[in-house]
């Protein structure tokens, strides 16, 4: 693997031929390496990428993986992936050859992360990301097996407990909210179960007067200080959610007070962080426990379960891909449900 010294620049460069995936032969040159070894490593990684070989650095595989995923995933999802890889994965595996990473390496990495007291769900997310890139290498770059799968998982898919508000707690909270826009946003999440991104993407045309429904056909996410509108996360997320008359009337009254608003303009101009701060402030005023903004959606689902609504109806209302997602996530939520069940059985004796 010859490389060359550039005496004029006091650096190293490599120049070599390769054949691309279409069978076309090319010559490429890369300058500016401070060390001979760096130039050799670049040439080896480049050729292994072209030949779909896993005798390349993990960092090189990451570049291939990200270039592929960028055409398939949202920008915000890719941003989150980059942060996670840069901070939790590349510092350990970046310079290692992909085919030299063993389950023992993975176990040691897992142990170090577990020792840092991250939340179990966060540990699971990190582990899943590493496993995904090795699955990619198995499928497309001839890696014999996924070392993460052999090493086993870490963390938990869902938290041990999920914080919700009961109806009484929500009423105490909403009585304290004075900002009209924030109040309507909180009510939509609690009474209709929308995700916060779905709420912030709503326009007047999404409030269907004939059936008193909310048409969820888009979502929004903040990136680089700008709100970006996207299609909902899955096909099931496209849905029309019936809402109670009182909520419909409140939304229409609020929209009618927005001077000059068009049918395609957003109803809300606040950000998720603003809603978080408002929730914390008003929950403290109401003297109730703090939850996250997203937990208002959880609270809606728990309320429906408490009302005895069919799980299929709840799943469709929330826009879940399957009923299993709804059942596994929410069925245990409402306080004292088990005690109430035991009392009902007692009455039947």
Image: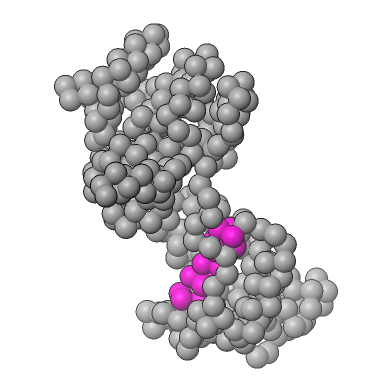
**Residue displayed at 61% across by 85% down:** 102
Residue 180 vertical position relative to residue 236 in the rendered view, above or below: above
* Quadrant of the image occupied by residue 228: top left
Q: Which residues are magenta?
A: 120-136
**Residue displayed at 59% across by 34% down:** 290
Provide residue 50's location: percent of width, then percent of height.
49, 80
Provide residue 164's location: percent of width, then percent of height.
49, 39
Number of callouts: 0
Residue 205 in magenta stretch: no
Q: Main secondary structure of the magenta part?
A: helix
Residue 89 vertical position relative to residue 49 in the rendered view, above or below: above
Res. 319 in view: no
In the figure, is residue 172 to the left or right of 229?
Answer: right
**Residue displayed at 57% across by 86% down:** 99
- In front of the other: 267 or 319: 319
How are the colours assigned in the image?
A: one colour
Outermost residue on the front side: it is: 349
- In front of the other: 329 or 273: 329
Quadrant in which the N terminus is drawn: bottom right
- In front of the other: 101 or 34: 101
Outermost residue on the bottom side: it is: 1
Residue 135 in magenta stretch: yes
Residue 23 vertical position relative to residue 336 in the rendered view, above or below: below
Res. 346 in view: yes
* Quadrant of the image occupied by residue 36: bottom right
- In front of the other: 307 or 209: 307
**Residue displayed at 49% across by 16% down:** 175
Provide residue 31's location: percent of width, then percent of height.
69, 72
């Amino acid at each position: 693997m010859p490389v060359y010294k550039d005496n004029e620049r006091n650096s190293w460069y490599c120049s070599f031929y390769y054949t691309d995936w279409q069978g076309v032969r090319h010559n490429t040159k890369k300058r500016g390496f401070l060390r001979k070894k760096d130039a050799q490593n670049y040439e080896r990684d480049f050729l292994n990428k072209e030949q779909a070989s896993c005798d390349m650095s993990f960092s090189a595989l990451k570049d291939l993986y990200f270039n592929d995923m960028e055409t398939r995933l949202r920008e915000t999802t890719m941003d989150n992936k980059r942060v996670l890889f840069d901070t939790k994965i590349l510092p350990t595996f970046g310079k290692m050859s992909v085919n030299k990473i063993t389950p023992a390496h993975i176990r040691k990495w897992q142990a170090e992360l577990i020792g840092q007291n991250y939340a179990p769900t966060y540990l699971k997310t990190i582990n899943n990301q590493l496993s995904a890139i090795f699955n990619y290498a198995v499928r497309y770059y001839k890696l014999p097996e996924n070392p993460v799968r052999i090493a086993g998982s870490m963390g938990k898919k869902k938290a041990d407990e999920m914080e919700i508000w009961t109806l009484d707690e929500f009423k105490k909270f909403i009585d304290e909210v004075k900002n009209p826009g924030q109040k309507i946003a909180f009510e939509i999440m609690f009474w209709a179960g929308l995700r916060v991104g779905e709420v912030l993407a709503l326009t007047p045309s999404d409030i269907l007067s004939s059936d008193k429904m909310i048409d969820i056909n888009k979502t929004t996410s903040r990136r680089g200080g700008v709100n970006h509108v996207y299609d909902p996360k899955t096909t099931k997320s496209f849905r029309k959610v019936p809402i109670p008359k009182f909520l419909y009337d409140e939304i229409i009254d609020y929209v009618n007070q927005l001077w000059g608003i068009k049918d395609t303009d957003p109803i809300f101009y606040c950000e998720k962080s603003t809603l978080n701060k408002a929730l914390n402030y008003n929950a403290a005023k109401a003297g109730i426990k703090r939850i996250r903004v997203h937990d208002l959606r959880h609270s809606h689902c728990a309320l429906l379960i408490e009302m005895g609504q069919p799980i299929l109806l709840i799943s469709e209302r929330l826009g879940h891909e399957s009923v299993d997602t709804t059942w596994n996530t929410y069925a245990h939520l409402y306080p004292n449900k088990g005690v109430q069940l035991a009392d009902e059985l007692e009455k039947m004796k």
